[in-house]
Amino acid sequence: MPDPLRKLGGKAVASSEEWEQGRREEVLRLFEERVFGAGPVGRPRRIAFEVKPTEGWMGGSAVRKQVRIRSEGPGGENVVRLLLFVPVSAKERPVPAFLLINNRGSEHMDAAREKRSPFWPAEAIVARGFAAAVFDNADADPDHHDGFRDGVHGVFDPPGERPGHAWGTIAAWAWAASRAMDYLETDHHIDASKAAVVGHSRGGKTALWAGAADRRFALVVSNNSGCTGAAVSRGKGGETIRQINDRFPHWFCENYKAYNDNEYALPVDQHMLIGLIAPRHVYVASATEDLWADPESEFLGLTFASPVYRLYGMDGIAGLPMPTAEQPLHTNGMGYHLRAGGHDMTEYDWQRFMDYAERFLCD
Ligand code: GCU
């Protein structure tokens, strides 16, 4: 397993200063160049937020805000529709927020609350005093391989041949999470210094990359994210790098394909992606029957990231045994739980994320 605390030249990193002043940047660039790809734009020069608030939701306990995030680039305009339910208590004091990168279609984020989904239990999130925010990943980039013409690639990519490190679809979704954060920072009802980004599966891989690249997210939650998410690729069961690149050739950058059946040649592994989140909080959740994602390798992602957390005097989970089902392990810096059942994100998972946030994120 590559050592997060050893620079490419071999020099050891012994303090958080040394991590911050060189090694962190090196690791971030490696993930950009070899795995997710680098985007041509961060916050676009031309970005606008159109907000439509309405009162009286959830029995009067919430305000609904429908936000259109409009980003303009050389290829036209992209609109990400962000939906928020904010507890009315936010009028007295800004509230922390959970932002879900929704990869399961807009039926899981019904603005009218006629159709409720445990995948985004907005009522339960608001009841615990958090703002519930969500956007549909397809707004930023539809999840199919069209040669990177649609979505934000079509809006921002320079013309000509794409380099091997050009951003893939997961990087585009992570970019959209950062644009949602741009909005949250403008909303006086939200405490943007206490915002969590959450994703399930392909969305969980996205949440990790969003949180690694954008240090404004105070908590990163990765549910059942598996291959190229929280799970280390070396020795991983279930899905491999070759399988993910073959089935989803648009998710990562072209350079990542050099590691098909060749994970030991990668200068990084997924624990280093988690390490990039330090000293902010990270939460990984697995499910007992989700062997394609591989719970043990997901837990190892946290274990091997722990030395980076220790540089900041935070506990991490190194040395602690993997917990059994429904025995959450919450330390300062890292949270983990294993849910009994299959590949999914349920209200049980959300309640544990909120337990963690209440304890470590809120005053
Ligand atoms: C597929 C893919 C996984 C991914 C999952 C999902 O199973 O192989 O890598 O996590 O879809 O997004 O649900």
Image: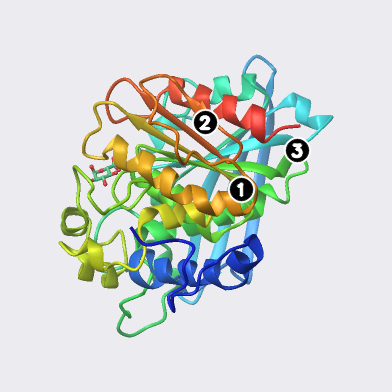
Residue ID at (18%, 42%): 238
Q: Which of 295 and 52 is in front in this view?
A: 295
Q: Which of 95 and 62 is in front in this view?
A: 95
Mark 1 to mark 2 CA distance (whole Å): 31 Å
Residue ID at (61%, 68%): 18
- Which dot, 1 or 2, sits closer to the camera? 1
Residue 52, placed above or below residue 90? below
Asked if the residue at tag 3 contacts the one at tag 2, i.e. Cβ–Cβ closer than 8 Å, the answer is no
Q: What element carries label 3?
A: loop
> Residue 49, located in which quarter of the rendered image?
bottom right
> Where in the image, quadrant-wise, is ligand 1 located?
top left
Q: Mark 3 points at which residue?
A: 189
In the picture, the disc for residue 280 is 1
Q: Give the image location of residue 292, x and y in percent.
A: 21, 39
Q: Name the residue under label 2.
A: 111
Earlier residue among tags 1 and 2: 2
Amino acid type for the residue under numbered disc 2:
Ala
Mark 2 to mark 3 CA distance (whole Å): 19 Å
Earlier residue among tags 2 and 3: 2
Residue 347, placed above or below residue 101? above
Q: Nearer the viewer, residue 257 or 69?
A: 257
Residue ID at (30%, 83%): 161
Residue 319, placed above or below residue 144? above
> Residue 72, located in which quarter of the rendered image?
bottom right
Asked if the residue at tag 2 contacts the one at tag 1, i.e. Cβ–Cβ closer than 8 Å, the answer is no
Q: How crowded is mark 3: few (under 14 residues within 10 Å), some or many (20 or more)?
A: many
